[in-house]
Structure formats: C-alpha cells, structure tokens
Image (cartoon, rainbow, N blue to C red):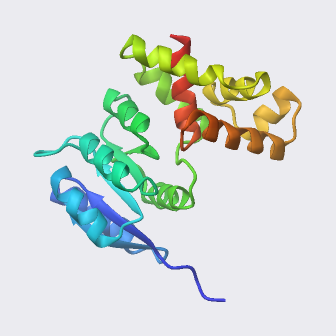
C-alpha cells in the first residue's frame, strides 16, 4: 500500500524571516510539501490556486490585502480550502472574524513546530484545528457583543430550526465540551453525538464546531 500524497501547503506572511522559518519547520516533514509562498494577501489570491495548495497558513496583518480579505475571497472560490490563521495575538478580534468567514482555526506564530505540523495534518483531514476547550477560550477572550443586531437575529433564527436535542448539543459545543463530555452530560453514545454534530453543520450551514460555537455565542448576546 502506497503512502498518502503529502499535504500541499502554502505560506502567506509579509515577513520573509517568518516565511523562511515556517518553510523550514514544515517543509522538512515527510507528510507536508510547501508548494508556494506569498508576501501579502493579494499575491495569495494567485499563488494559492496556481499551486493547488490544500492548506494555507495565513498571516492576518499584511500590506496590499490583509489575511482576512484574502481568506474571504479564497474560501469563496474554493470552500474545500483549509485556512489556518496566524497571529501574534491570542485575543485578536480579527481572528474571530476569520473564523466566521470559514477559516479552520488559528495558531500563534510562536507555536512549537510539532504543534504546527499537527495542526496542518488535523485541518487537512477535515477537522477544525481548535480543540473544543480552546474554542471556548478564544470566543470568551475576543467576542464582545455581536457586531450588529443582524448577527444576533440571524444566529437565533438559525438555531430556532434545531430540535430540542440538537439545541442541547449545540449549546454544549458552544461551551467547549468535547464529544466525550457531551456524551456523558447528555447520556448519549459518542457516535450519536457525532451524528448530531454532523446534523448541526448541515442545518446551521457551517463547516465546523468553531462556527457552531460562534452562532451559539451570538444568539445569547
């Protein structure tokens, strides 16, 4: 049986030293291939599709086009793309905005190499790279009141379409509980919890539990 193809990774950061360091840390991993680098969001719009990258490490603050705008455009073109937001801050309001747009998660730039490799692999497999507990901590740290009453109304409208059981699971996700913890709290098997979480994604029109948690937060404002 042949080994799976390496994960195709693009790095977008305006600091050449950061790009070089990330490239060295990640490109040397047998399961990851760095297929391109861009120094700003505008370059990323061309680089990412041309390089056929599957995962993008995206800095937020860059000249010409910031990472938030680039993430929005790239995911609008290819929703299957996985974007990991890079930031020097662990409580940055732009990180939450990126997650709302569909970014797979965020990491600090000083994250240890092994954790970065793990994050790339996790995201490439289709899972959000934020653990449930980190999701809860992030939202608590950066989420003030919903940016507009429309956000709150939209969140409440979408959650209103859930069954009572689905809403219980959504609330548990919003509190940062893992599937095992939800299973214990709601007296459900872990496979049943996974099924409910999958239904939440479909009904709420989201891609991962990070976005479920954000909706629950907005609805409670």
Q: Is residue 144 visible?
A: no
The vertical placement of 118 against 142, above or below, is: below
Quick one: 39 or 171, which is closer to the camera? 171
Quick one: 34 or 158, which is closer to the camera? 158
Q: For residue 25, what is the image quadrant?
A: bottom left
The vertical placement of 193 against 152, above or below, is: below
Residue 115 appears at what percent x and percent y? 49, 55
The vertical placement of 61 against 187, above or below, is: below
Q: Residue at x 20, y 51 (%)?
A: 41
Residue 156 appears at what percent x and percent y? 56, 17
Quick one: 210 or 19, which is closer to the camera? 210
Residue 77 appears at what percent x and percent y? 34, 54
Q: For residue 98, what is the image quadrant?
A: top left
Please give left or right for residue 20 compared with residue 193 in the image: left
The vertical placement of 37 against 119, above or below, is: below
The residue lying furthest to the left in this view is: 64
Residue 64 appears at what percent x and percent y? 10, 46
Please give left or right for residue 50 compared with residue 7 in the image: left
Q: Residue at x 39, y 38 (%)?
A: 101
Please give left or right for residue 155 compared with residue 161 in the image: left
> Which of the image's four quarters has the N terminus?
bottom right
Q: Residue at x 25, y 56 (%)?
A: 12
Quick one: 79 or 98, which is closer to the camera? 79
Q: Is residue 53 visible?
A: yes
Q: For residue 27, what is the image quadrant?
A: bottom left
The residue lying furthest to the bottom in this view is: 1
Q: How many marks?
A: 0
């Amino acid at each position: 049986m042949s080994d799976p193809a390496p994960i195709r990774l693009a790095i977008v950061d305006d600091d050449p030293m950061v790009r070089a360091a990330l490239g060295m840390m990640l490109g040397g991993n047998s399961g990851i291939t760095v297929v391109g680098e861009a120094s700003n969001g505008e370059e990323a719009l061309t680089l990412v599709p041309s390089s056929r990258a599957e995962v993008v490490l995206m800095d937020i603050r860059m000249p010409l086009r910031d990472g938030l705008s680039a993430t929005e455009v790239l995911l609008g073109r290819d929703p299957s793309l996985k974007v990991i937001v890079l930031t020097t801050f662990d409580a940055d309001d732009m990180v939450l905005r990126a997650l709302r747009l569909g970014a797979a998660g965020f990491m600090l730039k000083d994250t240890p190499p092994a954790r970065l490799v793990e994050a790339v692999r996790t995201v490439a497999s289709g899972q959000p790279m934020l653990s449930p507990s980190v999701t809860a901590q992030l939202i608590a740290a950066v989420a003030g009141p919903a940016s507009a009453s429309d956000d709150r109304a939209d969140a409440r409208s979408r959650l209103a379409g859930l069954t009572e059981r689905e809403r219980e699971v959504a609330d548990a996700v919003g509190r940062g509980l893992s599937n095992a913890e939800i299973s214990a709290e709601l007296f459900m098997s872990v496979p049943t919890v996974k099924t409910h979480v999958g239904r939440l994604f479909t009904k709420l029109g989201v891609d991962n539990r990070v976005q479920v948690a954000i909706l629950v937060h907005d609805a409670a404002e």
